Amino acid sequence: MMTLGSDVSNLSGAGRIQGLSIVVPVFNEAAGLARLHERLCALAGTLRQKYGLACEVVYVDDGSTDATLSIARGLPPTALDVQVVSLSRNFGKEAALMAGLDHARLGAVLFMDGDGQHAPELVERLVGHWIDDGYDVVYTAKAHRDNESILRRMGVRTFYSLINWGSRQKIPEDAGDFRLLSPRAAAALRQLPERNRFFKGLASWIGFKQIRVDYEPEARAHGVTTFSPGHLLGLSIEGLTSFSVAPLRVASLLGVLLATVAFLFGLSILWETVVSGKSVPGYPSLVVGLMTIGGVQLIMIGVMGEYIGKILSEIKARPIYFVAEHSVKSADASTVADKTPQTAAE
Ligand code: UDP
Ligand code: MG
């Protein structure tokens, strides 16, 4: 039978618990990786004790140019399985997350940054919300943005009000990529067919029982962020156009607004000529009108271009990432199985 929806109820939320896959995208994180791994091993020990939960960690090396990959390969599978998935080049964080999601084997999935900003110690609380309280999507959000500039906060506000405009499932403001998905939520996320992925949006769009956990991100353990303001702006446009049609609606509304103004202006000119018999000095208003309309049209063509670009990249249907190398170490037998090379086209 063909259905147009998807039933993931057989993968219960918290009911039948298999284990937890921790997905960590790493891009040039050599300096802090060993330390992070130690903390994750400790975490796995705690989770096994408290919930009888099996854990694995999936390090997705996103084309690092430093020693990240060789360090990741050497990490010991103490208390948890270790998978290392190495992409053929830098595909970006969203693609790395997708690769991790595809390789996660234990049902529930936790996404976490590899720079130590997402504290492994908080995970216990997230897992509690999943197992004890039965939530499917446990997402974290910055408790406050006091340390950010007003310009940045305004940008964030605008972005979320645009992306949430008229949508039924609002994307929570401030939510980060540090989140836990129950087996059925992870399955739902895997089934979304689009290539342009905006994880925060999709993880909220799938629904299920969601809960927000406020936390204070730690300072980056080493190095600097890879996301500059310009990069963030690009990502925002990316997220906006792959997730919502709000910009197109703004375009239509602006068109209506301009047309209305022009109409009223026309009426007023008519009024002046007919009633007061003045000949109207035309050209300044003409130039202003032309420039306004010209500018607005260019912007709107740009907006439409963004969407056409999206359509093109969806139609090309290229794989989101290529895996160049993949290794699995099991916690118990510490056997190593190497499969090289392998692609995402499964
Ligand atoms: N990252 C990645 N690919 C990239 C850029 C970043 O996998 O092209 C990873 C990075 O290693 C880190 C996480 O994404 O684990 C978040 O990156 P970063 O700390 O630079 O971003 P921020 O915390 O400032 O948002
Ligand atoms: Mg960071």
Image (cartoon, helix red, strand yellow):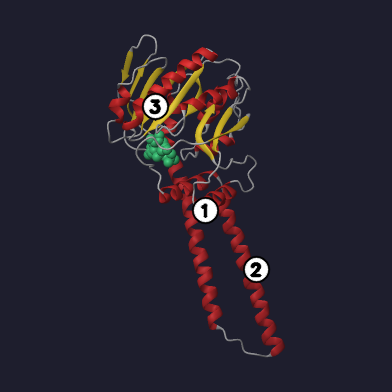
Mark 1: which amino acid?
Ile
Mark 2: which amino acid?
Thr
Residue 180, above or below 46 = below
Q: What label sits on residue 340 in the rendered view?
A: none
- Secondary-structure class at tag 1: helix
**The N terminus sits in image quarter:** top right
**The C terminus sits in image quarter:** top left
In terms of image quadrants, where is residue 133?
A: top right
Residue at left offset 43%, top offset 33%: 113
Is residue 196 visible in the rendered image? The answer is yes
Q: In the shown orientation, is residue 261 left or right of residue 153?
A: right
Mark 1 crowd level (few <14, some 14–19, many ≥20, 10 Å Cα): few
Where does label 2 land, which residue?
260
Residue 337, above or below 3 = above
Mark 3: which amino acid?
Leu
Residue 284, above or below 196 = below
- Badges 1 and 3: C-beta atoms under 8 Å apart? no
View extreme (right): residue: 275
Q: What label sits on residue 36 in the rendered view?
A: 3
Real-space Cα distance between discs 1 and 2? 34 Å
Residue 124, image x and y in percent? 53, 23
Q: In the shown orientation, is residue 25 left or right of residue 146?
A: left
Where does label 1 land, which residue?
150
In terms of image quadrants, where is residue 276?
A: bottom right
- Secondary-structure class at tag 2: helix
